[in-house]
Image (cartoon, rainbow, N blue to C red):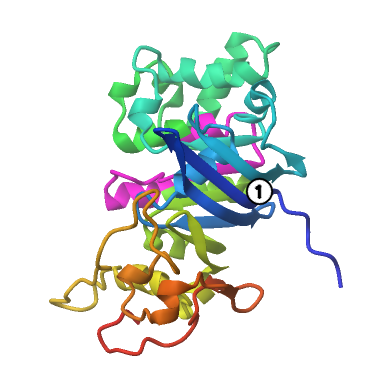
Amino acid sequence: MSASPAPLFEVRDLRVAFGRHGQFHEAVRGVSLTVAPGEVLGIVGESGSGKSVAMLAALGLNPEGSRVTGSVRFKGQELVGMSRRDLRKLRGSRVAMIFQDPLSSLNPVMTVGAQIAESVLLHNPGLPRRAAMERAAELLALVAIPQPDRRINQYPHEFSGGMRQRVMIAMAVANDPDLLIADEPTTALDVTVQAQIMQVLADLQHRLNLGLILITHDLGVLAGHADRVAVIYAGQVVEQAPVDDLFAQPGHPYTRGLIASIPNMAVEKERLFSIEGTPPALGRLPSGCPFNPRCSQARDICRSAVPPVSGPAQHRAACHFAFEAPATTDSPA
C-alpha cells in the first residue's frame, strides 16, 4: 500500500486573536486543515465565521496588533514566524490569493496590462518589460478575456465585474503558483457570470494542477467544484468531509442548517429555511458548544461541555450527537 502524498498546505491549531482595550479575543480558534497537490478544498460558513481571517493570517496578511499562533506549513516550510521579506517572496509566486472585491484590489489609474506585468516583474526582476506585457496578454487569453492585446491597454473601470474578477485570477496565476486561495470569487456577480468564473478556476486548476482553496458562504458553489469541504462556525472547523459525504450525511446541525437553506427550485411555493439567531460576537462565546443557542437539538450537555470531534477518519464533526438524525420534524434534514 503506497503512502499518501505529503500535503501541499497544512494548517494545525491556527489561532488568530484581535486586541481591544488591552484584551485579546480569538476570531480563529484552533483551525486545522490540509490541502493536497491538485485538490480543491472548500471552506464554508456564514459571514464573520472566521474563514477569510484564517487564510489571510496563514499567509501573513493579518493586521498589525493581531496575534497568530499555531502552525502553517507550505511544502513543509513553516510560515508562522517567517520574516515579512520571505513571505513577500512566497506570496504571488508559489502561493497566490484572489481577494473578495476586484474593483478595490485593482489600481484605477494603471492599465490592466501594466498591473499584471507588475506582478510578473516583481518575481522576475530580470525580465524585459515588453516580455512581461506579452505575458499579461497571454494571461488574459488564459482566463478567456477576448481581444487580450487590446484589453491590456484598458483601465479597470472599462471592465465589467466579471471581467475584473478574471483579471484578478490572471494576476494570481501569473507566476505559476502551486496553491491558489480564492476568497469569495463569485460575490456580487450574477448567476451566469458566477458559473463562468467557476469554470475558469476549474479549467486553470486542472491545467496547472493547482491546489485550490475556495472560501465561500455558498454551499451550492462547492457542490460541483470541491473535493472536500471544511465547515467553519465561530472560528472553529465544526465539520470536515469529502463533498459527497457532506451532502449525503451531514454530521453537524449547523451543516444541516446550511444545506437546508439552499433554495429548492423544483418545489413551488417553498418556505425558505433559515438558521435562527446570529453567530456569537468575539469575547461572548456561550459555554459548551458555540452553536447551542441556535441549535434546535441542543441538550444540557451541549450547554455545559465543549463537544469532541468524532466520526470516521474522513468525515469528522464537532458535536456531542454527530450524525444523529434530527429529533423533530421542523429541524433541517
> Which residue is nearer to you in this view: 185 or 254?
254
Q: Is residue 138 above or below residue 44?
A: above
Q: Quadrant of residue 6?
A: bottom right
Q: Amino acid at mark 1?
A: Asn
Q: Is residue 3 above or below residue 90?
A: below
As for residue 102 lying within the magenta part, the answer is: no
Rendering coords of residue 25 (x, y %): 45, 44
As for residue 189 lying within the magenta part, the answer is: yes
Which class describes the residues within 10 Å of circle 1: few (<14), some (14-19), or many (20+)?
Answer: some
Q: Quadrant of residue 270?
A: bottom left
**Residue ID for mark 1:** 209
> Which residue is nearer to you in this view: 87 or 187?
87
Rendering coords of residue 69 (x, y %): 62, 42
At a point 67% along the width and 34% down the height, the residue shown is 94
Q: Is residue 183 visible?
A: yes
At a point 44% along the width and 73% down the height, the residue shown is 304
Q: How many marks?
A: 1
In which quadrant is the N terminus drawn? bottom right
Rendering coords of residue 209 (x, y %): 66, 48
Q: Is residue 144 visible?
A: no
Q: Quadrant of residue 303?
A: bottom left
Rendering coords of residue 55 (x, y %): 53, 43
> Which residue is nearer to you in this view: 51 or 243?
51
> Which residue is nearer to you in this view: 147 or 32?
32
In which quadrant is the C terminus drawn? bottom left
Furthest residue in direction left, as rendered = 269
Q: Which residues are magenta?
A: 169-197
Furthest residue in direction front, as rendered = 22
Disc 1 on helix, strand or loop?
loop
At a point 46% along the width and 86% down the height, the residue shown is 324
At a point 47% along the width and 18% down the height, the residue shown is 115
